[in-house]
Image: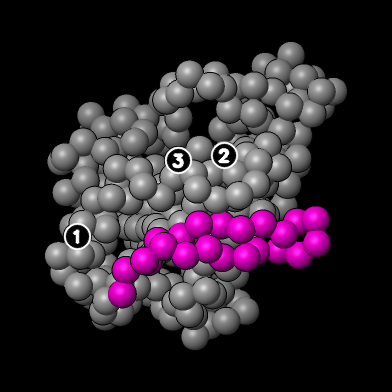
Amino acid sequence: MQHAIRVGEGEDARTIAALSRPGAAPIVVWLGGLRSDMRATKAEALDSWASRTGRAFLRFDYSGHGESGGRFEDGTISRWLEDAAAALADRQATRPILVGSSLGGWLALLLARHLRREAPDRAPAGLVLVAPAVDFTERLMWDCFPEAVRAEIIERGVYLRPSLYSEDPYPITRALIEDGRRHLLLESAIEVGCPIHVLQGMCDPDVPWEHALRLVEHLPGEGVQLTLVKDGDHRLSRPEDLDRLVRAVERMAVSSG
């Protein structure tokens, strides 16, 4: 079922698009990557699995992505986190399994931490993270940008970054970078209160596998699993990668149900 969700107030008000499938709890919630959308390959694979197994499934587009309203250039981590929280609230998702890819991995951790503090009865039962780009605005962008690019972001407010996945460059805004600093996780222990399974390709040009190791170092000592795919890229969308993802989500859902 496709539906629209209103998020924000006043000048920040926007409408995001979502697709939901009824089924057994716990609901599985897909959080996609930067400039991806809810009909991308991994999301479709999980929806097919949910259909076969009778599992409840929710996917949505952040504002400025896919079928949702708004401009990508207006996006920030705070804004996309608010979109994700609104999508869960709209479906009254209790103890979901959050599956986050790249940007979605960072948002899943932020959302899990927020719900654990503010609404424990709705805190996730488990997380499956694919190439989680935690703190990417700072660690994988700002820290790696040459001085000329940093100056362009500060002075012009935006840098058009070439993309490996599209002919159109990614607008990296000053607002995105500055807002990202409000949500950095890799400076202290990350407590989310549920099992976590990380899937990471070792040939990932966007999120190095060493970044995933750093994330694991900040997670609790128990209930954390890391799967390194030696020939895996950032997308992890080959048939064998999709099978690996589905198995990880299924195990998490079954053990949490």
Whole-percent x, y for residue 152 in the image: 77, 19
Viewer can see residue 180: no
Around disc 3, counting alpha carbons within 10 Å, would you say few (fewer than 14), some (14 to 19), or many (20 or more)?
A: some
Whole-percent x, y for residue 13 in the image: 72, 59
The three-letter amino acid code for the residue at tag 2 is Phe
Q: Which residue does the numbered mark 1 point to in the structure image?
A: 49
The three-letter amino acid code for the residue at tag 1 is Trp
Q: Disc 3 vs disc 2: which is toward the camera? A: 3
Q: Quadrant of residue 31?
A: bottom left
Q: Which residue does the numbered mark 2 point to in the structure image?
A: 136
Q: Quadrant of residue 110?
A: bottom right
Whole-percent x, y for residue 141 in the image: 61, 30
Q: Which residue does the numbered mark 3 point to in the structure image?
A: 36
Is residue 256 highlighted in magenta?
Answer: no
Q: In the image shown, does 59 or 156 lie closer to the viewer?
A: 59
Magenta-highlighted residues: 1-22
Is residue 8 highlighted in magenta?
Answer: yes
Q: Quadrant of residue 189?
A: bottom right
From mark 3 to mark 2, how far is it between C-alphas?
Answer: 16 Å
